[in-house]
Image (spheres, rainbow, N blue to C red):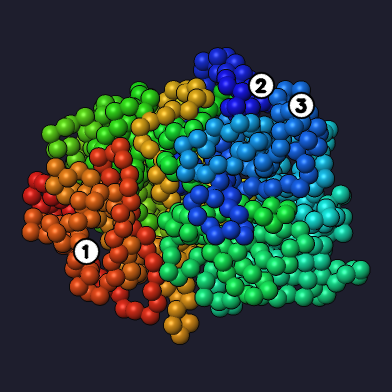
């Protein structure tokens, strides 16, 4: 290794060697795969921009090393020499010579090595190079060390978040202690001495704390917390309050702000925070405490800082700086989250990241102690270097011996019976890929969900064809697909009435399929013939005015597990139940708590354990600090069939879902595939709500007005045009369409219109004729003939909705509209 390359030592080598020895020792075990909404596309690194110079690509600098996902940074004020001298096992660190000046030091969260940890990086001797430079990674010296080991978390896998350094102590969030109550967050604030490793819990037991911030003096810590009330299922802005307490021992805890989150200090009597205002804009506020007096809630002065007209949130401050703060914004004229400064003297915004990366989301700003640098994280993209390839299977550290966990880049992942292939959904379309990441194929263009392999017939998949999250009467049918049939006649519909027939699961002998159907006006379970479908016989398994769904047949054939709201119909609260295929033995497996959700059960290969996704562990971070997640509470759990041995497997602030077991054990090693990182994730949908004329609100993606799902092929010779074009329009009047092919852009702009008959282009032009505002932008991408057309939806208030329905039939061979 060249001396100018990375020096990443301390525990890393030990952890890698330990993982290798564990993999060699484990030849048998079990494996669970699951999906995490958007996570495979994040590829976050931490960047900085100067706070005083005009922002441009040349003065944006990438600080982290491009490995895995790196986020939520903190720039400590302590010199690097003192931090390094504190670290245990510091003899393993090859520090630079004393003469080498420190360029920058950073504490941040990273998800490398299959688990969340907090790292420290010190960059020496002119390391700050443009993120646009090919040599941005080739820094002269990088000293890197993980600040926490498993011992600080009592050898339990956990999520870490929001680190900051106070003297010799690291303050952070961890989820390693189980509160023992359903739907209760595990998030708590801890303090760990960097020299001794002594760890102290600062959050009272029975309480969850989020987003800690230490005052400049180190005396006080502020947190967002529900207090003893606890989380009530919120997935947008949390109704937390701001509490402060003494950092040294967590005493003198007092609520200082009613309704607020994401606190940050300027001095020991001034902090900023965000909340949703009465006018529905997320805004930044300032709280001022009395000096030299006891701090009580009624003695705190609250002042709104940012004006209406845009969303402003996740504020950041620097010690003693009363001139400006940093914050994230969502403006009505942008679909992207950006970092801006707000001049608190002139009450003016100063845009930063929009001038550098206008079509990239930027998250969670922080400011250097001298106020000279503003940091944030964003997707590094292909032009910013980095060592992370797109992963088909991402190893996630498992808390259970002989059980491996993998995050799959695709929804509803499921292994073939032989364990050699993986099928998954990428709305729209079903894909199959070899377990090693090779031979990726789209086997169906259908908009589908909930897929299962036939247990006997090789290459047969069952799926639900139609829109997800729909009513009982929506046209959804169970379809069998032969993935090895290449002549195009590989679809066979098994249900005939189209009344939301979904979640098929075959019996172990391959003769029958259990599924849910809304044919009676309620979603209940049915069993049909696996070959002839419901025409070969239909058995009603459950019956009642509730929803039974997400069924899974046990490998021994004795049980069917499913999710149901029968205990409180229509409440949205789902619990897991078991029933015999003959309709007897119904029993509840797990209670999910008040208004809780336990979904997507899947039997282990031996039939003794069920994995599922649930909000049993509450929420782990403020949702606004992340990209869009439908359910930012989702974690993967397992439970025995007798209701015992409940175990939490995943810890993060994302939405983990649709777990399933692999038929064979897979070693805990990442599997790379050819798909390239695209940074194609969305901002929080609820931030699309912008106050409009006369106080109206424009609904975000996911509302119930207009629902279009189209997939188009334009000219086989123009594979980069609209192949796999997909988008959903719901309640919007402005559409921004991005495409990676200039020829396709020229088609839309009219220069090739004579060569096109009825295609997706014609429908877009039809929308344009109905006074929709369509903007087209070119986004350069290479290396994939099958390109994406991504729609970003920008709201405009006070308008009528024009319905647009795609053609519901196939056109000629070289053009197709799918639905």
Residue 631, x across and y down, in percent: 51, 53
Is residue 38 rendered to the left or right of residue 758?
Answer: right
Residue 70: percent from left, percent from top? 57, 42
Residue at far right of view: 292
Residue ID for mark 1: 764
Residue matched to label 2: 14
Q: Earlier in the sequence, mark 3 or mark 1?
A: 3
The local secondary structure at tag 3 comes to helix
Residue 89: image location, x then y, percent: 77, 25
Residue 90 - label: 3
**Percent position of residue 701, x then y:** 40, 63
Query: SS class of the residue under badge 1?
Result: helix
* First of labels 2, 3 by sequence position: 2
Residue depicted at 68% across the width and 74% down the height: 345
Closer to the observer: label 2 or label 3?
A: 3
Q: Earlier in the sequence, mark 2 or mark 1?
A: 2
Q: Which mark is residue 613?
A: none
Left-right relation of 703 to 473: right
Quadrant including the N terminus: top right
Q: Secondary structure at mark 2?
A: helix
**For this rendering, which residue is in front, 194 or 492?**
194
Crowdedness of circle 1 by 10 Å Cα count: few (<14), some, many (20+)?
Answer: some
Report how far apart the C-alphas of labels 2 and 3 lie in the structure: 13 Å
Q: Give the residue at x 64% y 47%.
A: 73
- CA gap between label 3 and label 1 equals 61 Å
Determine which quarter of the picture holds residue 738.
Answer: bottom left
Instruction: Measure how far apart labels 2 and 1 are at the Cα level.
Output: 56 Å
> Relative to 208, is 604 on the left or the right?
left
């Amino acid at each position: 290794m060249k001396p100018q390359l990375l020096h990443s030592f301390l525990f890393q080598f030990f952890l890698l060697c330990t993982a290798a020895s564990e993999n060699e020792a484990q030849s048998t075990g079990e494996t669970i795969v699951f999906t995490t909404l958007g996570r495979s596309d994040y590829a976050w690194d931490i960047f900085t921009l100067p706070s005083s110079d005009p922002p441009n690509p040349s003065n944006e600098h990438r600080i982290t090393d491009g490995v895995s996902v790196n986020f939520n940074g903190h720039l400590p004020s302590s010199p690097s020499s003192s931090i390094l001298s504190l670290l245990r096992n510091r003899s393993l660190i090859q520090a630079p010579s004393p003469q080498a000046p420190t360029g920058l030091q950073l504490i941040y969260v990273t998800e490398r090595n299959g688990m969340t940890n907090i790292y420290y990086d010190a960059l020496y001797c002119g390391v700050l190079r443009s993120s646009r430079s090919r040599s941005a990674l080739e820094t002269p010296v990088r000293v890197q060390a993980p600040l926490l080991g498993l011992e600080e978390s009592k050898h339990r896998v956990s999520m870490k978040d929001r680190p900051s350094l106070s003297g010799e102590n690291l303050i952070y969030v961890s989820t390693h202690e189980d509160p023992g109550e359903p739907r209760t967050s595990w998030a708590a604030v801890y303090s760990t001495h960097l020299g001794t490793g002594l760890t102290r819990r600062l959050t009272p037991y029975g309480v969850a704390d989020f987003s800690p911030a230490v005052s400049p003096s180190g005396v006080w810590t502020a947190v967002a917390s529900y207090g003893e009330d606890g989380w009530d299922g919120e997935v947008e802005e949390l109704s937390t309050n701001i509490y402060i307490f003494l950092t040294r021992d967590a005493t003198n805890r007092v609520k200082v702000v009613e309704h607020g989150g994401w606190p940050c200090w300027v001095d020991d009597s001034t902090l900023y925070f965000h909340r949703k205002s009465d006018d529905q804009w997320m805004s930044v506020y300032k709280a001022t405490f009395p000096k030299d007096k006891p701090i009580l809630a009624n003695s705190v002065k609250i002042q709104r800082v940012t004006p209406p007209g845009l969303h402003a949130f996740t504020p950041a401050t620097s010690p003693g700086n009363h001139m400006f703060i940093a914050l994230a914004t969502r403006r009505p004229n942008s679909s992207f989250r950006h970092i801006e400064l707000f001049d608190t003297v002139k009450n003016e915004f100063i845009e930063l990241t929009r001038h550098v990366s206008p079509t990239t989301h930027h998250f969670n700003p922080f400011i250097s102690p001298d106020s000279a640098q503003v940091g944030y994280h964003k997707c590094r993209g292909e032009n910013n270097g980095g060592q992370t390839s797109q992963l088909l299977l991402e190893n996630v550290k498992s808390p259970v011996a002989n059980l491996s966990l993998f995050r799959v880049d695709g929804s509803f992942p499921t292994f073939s019976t032989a364990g050699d292939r993986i099928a998954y959904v990428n709305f729209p379309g079903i894909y199959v890929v070899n377990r090693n990441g090779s031979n990726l194929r789209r086997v169906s263009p259908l908009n589908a969900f909930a897929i299962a392999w036939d247990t006997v017939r090789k290459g047969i998949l069952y799926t639900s064809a139609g829109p997800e999250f729909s009513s009982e009467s929506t046209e959804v049918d169970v379809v069998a697909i032969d993935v090895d049939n290449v002549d195009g006649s590989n679809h066979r519909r098994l249900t005939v009435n189209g009344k939301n027939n979904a979640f098929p699961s075959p019996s172990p002998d391959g003769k029958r399929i259990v599924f849910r159907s809304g044919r009676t006006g309620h979603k209940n379970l049915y069993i049909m013939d696996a070959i002839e479908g419901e025409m070969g016989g239909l058995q009603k398994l459950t019956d009642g005015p509730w929803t039974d769904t997400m069924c899974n047949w046990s490998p021994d054939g004795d049980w069917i597990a499913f999710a149901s709201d029968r205990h409180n119909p229509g409440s949205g609260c789902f619990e897991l139940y078991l029933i015999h295929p003959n309709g007897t033995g119904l029993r509840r497996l797990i209670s999910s708590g008040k208004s809780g959700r336990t979904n997507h059960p899947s039997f282990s290969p031996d039939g003794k354990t069920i994995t599922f996704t649930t909000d049993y562990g509450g929420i782990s971070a403020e949702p606004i600090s992340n990209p869009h997640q439908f359910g930012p509470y989702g974690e993967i759990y397992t439970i025995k069939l007798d209701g015992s041995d409940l175990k939490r497997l995943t810890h993060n602030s994302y939405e983990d879902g649709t777990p399933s077991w692999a038929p064979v054990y897979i070693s805990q090693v990442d599997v790379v595939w050819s798909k390239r990182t695209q940074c194609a994730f969305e901002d929080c949908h609820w931030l699309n709500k912008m106050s409009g004329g006369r106080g109206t609100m424009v609904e975000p993606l996911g509302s119930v007005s207009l629902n279009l799902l189209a997939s188009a092929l334009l000219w086989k010779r123009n594979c980069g045009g609209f192949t796999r074009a997909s988008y959903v329009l719901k309640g919007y009047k402005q559409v921004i369409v991005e495409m990676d092919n200039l020829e396709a852009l020229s088609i839309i702009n009219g220069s090739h219109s004579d060569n096109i008959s009825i295609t997706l282009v014609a429908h877009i032009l039809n929308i344009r004729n109905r006074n929709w505002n369509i903007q087209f932008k070119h986004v350069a991408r290479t290396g994939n003939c099958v390109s994406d057309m991504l729609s970003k939806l920008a709201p405009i208030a006070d308008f009528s909705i024009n319905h647009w329905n795609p053609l519901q039939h196939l056109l000629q061979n070289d053009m197709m509209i799918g639905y």
